Amino acid sequence: MKGVVISSGKIASKSFYDEHMKDADFIICCDGGANVAYKYGFVPNLIIGDFDSVDRRILEYFKINGIQIMEFPCEKDKTDTQIAIEYLAENGFDEVVMLSCTGERLDHVLANISLLYYLLERGIVGTIVDENNIIMMTRDKIKIHGKKGHLLSLLPYTQTVSGICTKGLYYSLENGVMKFGNPYGVSNVIIEDEAIVEVKDGVLLVILSSD
């Protein structure tokens, strides 16, 4: 099952959300993500958060229309997005797409990237998607369906990532090693319709960029 989480970060176009939600089994809006749902006219299954960034009139609109609301205190140890991710993980979802999870708040961006690791540890396919990037993590093998000329960056998320092999990239690796603090895998270029990245040990952050 596929779950989609919409957070309070950068707002994209309506067509962007339509594309990534069209086959969703469950949609969660985190706090200000409900503003996006209201703006573009789609209906979430659940709205969660401490509600410090949502328009209260919008929240009331969804409440009146029978949408499940879960409110949490502002003083808590987890972000709204983390609560949403854990909800999906605990309810049997095997794919999670995170939208509006990037933007001006770098602390939230890094926190959201760390949630990809949470999903990876539980065998759940997780991606963060905005209009310019797709962010993923792997500890084994991942296939990337990008366009030729798009950029693909590989960054170690553990201290050492070894046995890295790539196909379909301009700069190829065969049994490569990456160490945290030496980001030499930035801005590789896709040269085939499908790129493949394999890892034998460690966790690799994979970022596909269109600009």
Image (spheres, rainbow, N blue to C red):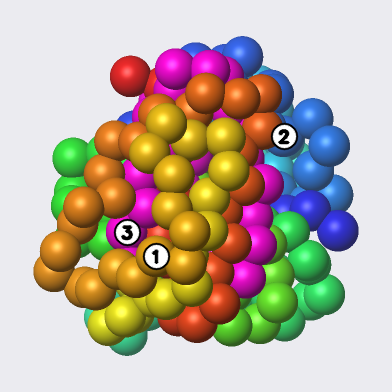
Image side of residue 188 versus residue 2, left or right: left
Mark 1: give few (<14), some (14-19) or many (20+) Cα within 10 Å: some
Q: Amino acid at mark 1?
A: Gly
Provide the residue designation for mark 1. Answer: 176
Q: Of tags 3 and 2, which is closer to the observer? A: 3
Q: Is residue 180 above or below residue 7?
A: below
**Badges 1 and 2: C-beta atoms under 8 Å apart?**
no
Mark closer to the chain start, 1 or 3: 3
Image side of residue 197 versus residue 23, left or right: left
Image side of residue 59 versus residue 63, left or right: left
Mark closer to the chain start, 3 or 2: 2
Image side of residue 209 versus residue 137, left or right: left
Q: Nearer the viewer, residue 29 or 121?
A: 121
Alpha carbon distance from label 1 to label 3: 12 Å
Give the residue at x 78% y 66%.
94
- Magenta segment boundaries in residue numbering: 131-156
Provide the residue designation for mark 3. Answer: 155
Mark 3: give few (<14), some (14-19) or many (20+) Cα within 10 Å: many
